[in-house]
Image: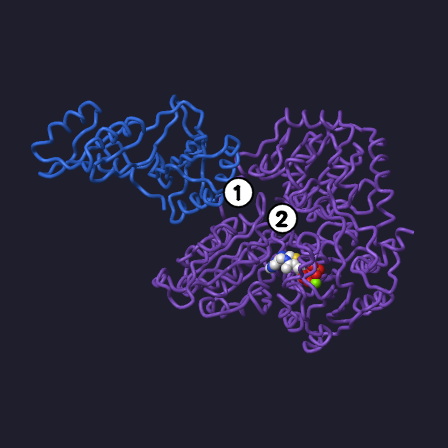
Amino acid sequence: MLHTFVVYVEDKPGVLTRVASLFRRLNININSLTVGRSERAGLSRITLVCEASAEAGHRIRASLFKLENVVDVDDISQAPAVTRELALIKVAASPQTRAQIFDLVEVFRARIVDLTSESLMIEMTGVESKIEGLIEVLREDEGRILEICRSGKMTMRRGHHVSSVVKAMTVTPAGSADESAEAREKNVAGEAD
Amino acid sequence: MATNGNSQSSTAHLTTPTPLTGAEILWATLAGEGVTDVFGYPGGAILPVYDALRKFPIRHILVRHEQGAAHMADGYARASGRVGVAMATSGPGATNLVTGIATAMLDSIPMVCVTGNVPTRVLGTDAFQEVDITGVTLPITKHNFLVTRTEDVAATLRHAFQIARSGRPGPVLVDITKDAQQGSANFNFEAAKPRPYRPHPMLRVEDSGLDQAAELIRNAKRPVILAGHGVMESGAMEQVRTLAERAQIPVALTLLGLGGFPASHPLNLGMMGMHGEAWVNDAIQEADLLIACGMRFDDRVTGTPATYALKAKKIHIEVDPAEINKNVKVDVALVGDLAEVLEQLLPRIAGRDGAAWLKAIEASKGAVAVHDIKNLPDMGHLYAAHVMHDLWRMTGGDAVVVTDVGQHQMWEAQYFRHERPRTLITSGGLGTMGFALPAAIGAKIACPEKEVWVVAGDGGFQMTAAELATIVQEKIKINIALINNGYLGMVRQWQEFFYERNYEATPLVCPDFVKLAGAHGIAARAVHKRAEVAEAVAAARSAAGPYLIDFQVEKEDAVYPMIPAGSALHEMIRRPGKRVKDPLEETADE
Ligand SMILES: Cc1ncc(C[n+]2csc(CCOP(=O)(O)OP(=O)(O)O)c2C)c(N)n1
Ligand SMILES: [Mg+2]
């Protein structure tokens, strides 16, 4: 089954290697991995999705906790949660063929974030299946997709659930209210390693 | 863990008014952590540290190979419960530690390894003798650190000690760049104290679990306690004994559990697993309840998990949550420090009548004892089992025995009866040949008042025999019982059983070990007959210095019983009844 873990780790060199190495060691393939800053300074948040037997969940979580730099681990494989992925897709499009893509983007509630005479870039956020859907439609025209960049999944539990461990830590929240959009974007693409 | 800390010496509150170099901070921090002995080998990247050593009251034992340093630190820790410390230079020095670190990791031994590395500015450039040792050791350490700033030396080392000795112990490596050793910084031991240790968040001992465990114990007809290394690590000998005695439950031990429950105790069944006695494994297979205490159901003790103890409910008391349901599914998991969990469990345990089950087990021993090699005449041969039996009798079981890996290791486990914890030191998880001699040096330095014996095979002994020079240089009184069968015996045994006696690459040409010892100035003698064993052991024990006995034992003897890898516990190979070549069996069958 697919397991989804939210892992809070110390934002230090080498930490991502330790997490990844654990999965390598357990011979488990990581399907998706997203790392970025969290609500706490000095803590990164990892969303990790992997395929493993149902019983493996306990051992993975217990083993993650054994890593010195891991602060909290939440197994949200079964929990109600919101999951999103971000995709940037560059497609070939001339001024003549653009209109069709604009329509598609409209239907999928994506947006155009860059435009040149030969190509344009689509940004799309959503669940995996929606992104797959857009890609599939774009692929109908062979050679149209030039590049795809996908963030991997980000997941957050629904409801008023927060990490009690992180909450208990007496450190100030990262960033401030007037954080720029650019900085927020960096949160998604940031690296713990 | 309470029993696992180094006693903090008076330097613990040391704070210097003037800055120290990183090298000095390192020694001051080690001293503060209670370290009195360090096993190491110098080189360019750690020279500043060696240069500063003379200012500190710490003994440095110069090894002959860094693998030896790691095994010595490991043996030191196993013998004493204190954290062992090994030190090496960058590159080849660091990589030579690797086998020793993995050995400690697999057996959960608290150890801190300090390595020097090239200066920070050339890190990652393939500089001379640069190896990414934190990368190399990542999967075989409990944790490791790279220190590039002098200011971080003290806090990192203190954190390393905390990690090494807490929870499920393990080795920690601290890699310190040369510039961090040479730079200077203020030193304040107290300020470098790590945050309080955070126990694993998944430790869980609930009343409901304890009640359930107590009820299972109350209702069991055929219970067995499985005692492992955790008994020692947790210091739970008393609690295990109380549980066994009060509820009249027999105790089976893993290899690393030997000594955790007295061998002479009427409830002691002996060693379980691949070379455990038949009645032990049969009792486990017949049991309706297993109470696993600080053991991890290793494949060497379970055989095929699919056929393991199918009739038994299982209670697992274990400090590492990642071990729960890993190899064997359990019914009740009590995840916490063994001694503490048993303290909570014991008030729920009442007296029980275990007589019928104990009698049944006793009856199953009957026929086996007759075939036990220990009860058979030697007919002019020298059997390793007899050597172990005699060594045990002569030392009164008081000695610390440090074994290597192979047949001799199993014979030791079978025939040397361990009464007390930390009297058997052996590489169980990794099975590292070459472990015994260096680990024994570490054990002797940790416990100078104890009688220490190496029991090694002719193969493994040659892997680290260079440390003979170390015991001479450091004036270390240990005795060495070499079980010399001219073969990589355990591998030869597998070839005999499973590869049609194709003895490929297992016959060994060995040096004259008596002369080898002599070349080091170590007294030695060879023994060919059982009649000579006692005298040789007595000579070794009374000698002022180290002593080596080359026991030239039967060449093609095998360890029995044996559960072939991948078989069920009750499918064991017994000493064959009709090998005409074997004079023992002729007598036994009469
Ligand atoms: C470093 C290492 N290499 C290889 C092995 C595989 N191995 C296990 S037992 C053994 C034979 C040991 O021979 P010896 O030291 O003579 O002991 P004996 O079995 O004869 O008592 C070997 C090669 C090992 N355990 N460790
Ligand atoms: Mg041998």
Chain of the residue where label 2 is placed in the rendered structure: B
Residue located beneath label 1 in the image: B197
Amino acid tagged 2: Asn
| Front one among B575 and A33 | B575
What colour do you see for chain B? Answer: purple
Quick check: which quadrant has ligand 2?
bottom right
Residue B4, numbered label: 2
Chain of the residue where label 1 is placed in the rendered structure: B
Quadrant occupied by the N terminus of chain B: top right
Picture coordinates of residue A107, whole percent (x, y): 20, 22
Spot the blue chain and give its letter.
A
Picture coordinates of residue A138, whole percent (x, y): 21, 31
Picture coordinates of residue B375, whole percent (x, y): 87, 53
Q: Earlier in the sequence, mark 1 or mark 2?
A: 2
- Up-down relation of residue B235 to residue B13 (above or below): above
Q: Secondary structure at mark 2?
A: helix
Q: Secondary structure at mark 1?
A: loop
Do we see residue A40 in this rendering? Answer: yes
Give the left or right position of residue A56, taking residue B367 as reference.
left
Do we see residue B447 in this rendering? Answer: no
Same subunit, tags 1 and 2: yes
| Front one among B254 and B35 | B254
Picture coordinates of residue B232, whole percent (x, y): 68, 46
The residues bearing labels 1 and 2 have C-alpha atoms spaced at a distance of: 14 Å
Tell me which residue sits at (27%, 33%) in the image.
A86
- Up-down relation of residue B48 to residue B408 (above or below): below
Give the left or right position of residue A136, taking residue A70 as reference.
left
Amino acid tagged 1: Tyr
